[in-house]
Amino acid sequence: MDERTKLLVSLAAATAANCIPCFEYLFCEAEAAELTREEIQTAVDLASKVKNGAHIALKNSMNDIMGLEEQYTMPCCEQSKNSLCE
């Protein structure tokens, strides 16, 4: 994996983990590697979608445990009929 891709994956992981110090460090590294703000923002946006999906799955499981009927739609289901979250 090339260095630019490693940095983008790492920035996404820092986003998903809510690790601000990691993100700050990696952001400086990404700028030094001449990644664009658009490339970085794309990685952050994708990580946020994954993180949001995990939170929705958690809320749905909690509702199941509590016997509540309300279920939230997983964001991945909006994009693909072949998603694992169906």
Image: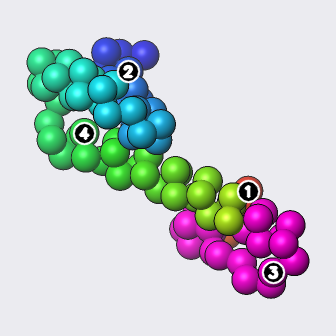
Give the quarter of the figure containing the C terminus: bottom right
- Residue toward you, 20 or 40: 20
| Above or below, 35 relative to 73 | above
Element at badge 3? loop
Determine if the magenta segment contains residue 51. Answer: no
Q: Residue at x 55, y 66 (%)?
A: 75
Residue designated by label 2: 6
How was the colour assigned to the protein in this rendering?
rainbow
Q: Residue at x 81, y 81 (%)?
A: 68
Residue designated by label 1: 84
Label 4 crowd bin: few (<14), some (14–19), many (20+), radius 10 Å: some
Rendered location of residue 56, percent (x, y): 62, 64
Element at badge 4? helix
Residue designated by label 4: 40
| Above or below, 69 relative to 41 | below
Determine if the magenta segment contains residue 74. Answer: yes
- Residue toward you, 57 or 6: 57
Instruction: Name the residue type under label 1.
Output: Leu
Element at badge 1? loop
Chain part drawn in magenta: 60-80
Residue designated by label 3: 68
User: Which image quarter: residue 34?
Assistant: top left
Instruction: Name the residue type under label 2.
Output: Lys
